[in-house]
Image (spheres, rainbow, N blue to C red):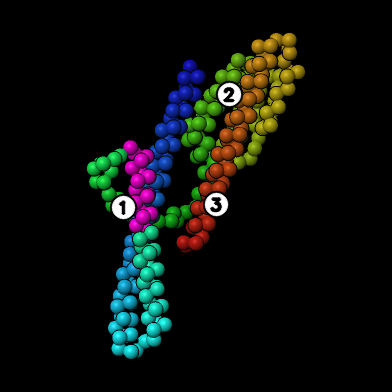
Amino acid sequence: EAHLEATQRMLADAVLTLVQDVRVAFVELQAAQQLEQVNLSIAQARQASLDTATALFEAGNISPLEMAREQAQYEDSRLAWNDAQGAVVIARERVNGLLGLWGARAMKWQVTEPIAGVPEEEVTLDQLGTLAVSRRMDLQAAIKHTEVAAHRLNFAIDWGWLHGFEVAGKLERDDGGLLVGPEVHLALPLFDQGQGERARGAAELRRRLHLTTALATDIRAEVRMRRDAVMRMRRTTI
């Protein structure tokens, strides 16, 4: 039953990962479309400025150098708009690919809502960490696999340390024989080394604990990295 639950959580993680990828791709498309509109406005303003400069140049009121500068600025804005249009096409095709759309279905849908603004309130690192740990199905699957290995040796695992950013953990044998920290030191002398099956079970438990701890560490690192990126963008836009 535990193996089934772990498999279900792995499948759920794959589905949630796809949903998140689609959501990110959609937001990137929204941003690309808004940037394209900004570049279009700039190009239109440069076109108007060039038309005015052309009239002034023909009347002899500006120098050839000023005219050349106006022409160069217009060309730069037109190229920037062209690049922005290409970015929209790429972003849209990424969404189509993730959703499995092609042909007419890939061309019909439209983005009607602008990208959301910067949130007014910051989310703390602890809040994000708790949310990530509770919703990452790959971590939940790893926990289940580890608990299966622990159950075979009559161990119970306290996963309380996963819910914060302070590293601390506890592994306890049902008969009260062992407590260990996050390094997950399960020394084989705790077992009768003459019993090969139990020794293999201990090795498997160590492996599962290390894998789960490594995954949880990676999740925390990813949360810190992404929050830092958001905070830096927030400082530049507010």
Q: Is residue 29 left or right of residue 139?
A: left
Residue 156 in which image quadrant: top right
Q: Is residue 204 left or right of residue 22?
A: right
Which amino acid, by three-letter code, is at mark 3?
Asp
Q: Nearer the viewer, residue 106 or 178?
A: 106
Q: Residue at x 63, y 29 (%)?
A: 210
- Bounds of the magenta segment: 84-100
Label 3 environment density (alpha carbons within 10 Å; few <14, some 14–19, many ≥20): few
Question: For this rendering, which residue is in front, 155 or 50?
Answer: 50
User: Of residues 98 and 207, which is closer to you in this image?
Assistant: 98
State whether the magenta stretch is mostly helix, strand or loop. Answer: helix
Picture coordinates of residue 23, whole percent (x, y): 39, 44
Dot 1 alpha-carbon crowd within 10 angstroms: few under 14, some 14 to 19, many 20 or more: few
For mark 3, what is the residue? 228
Magenta includes 69?
no
Q: On the picture, is 128 further left or further right than 203?
A: left
Residue 87 pos. (x, y %): 38, 54
- Label 2 crowding class (10 Å Cα cut-off): few <14, some 14-19, many 20+? many
Q: Which residue is the site of mark 2?
A: 146
CA–CA distance in space, label 3 to label 1: 27 Å
Q: Position of residue 14 (x, y in %)?
A: 44, 32
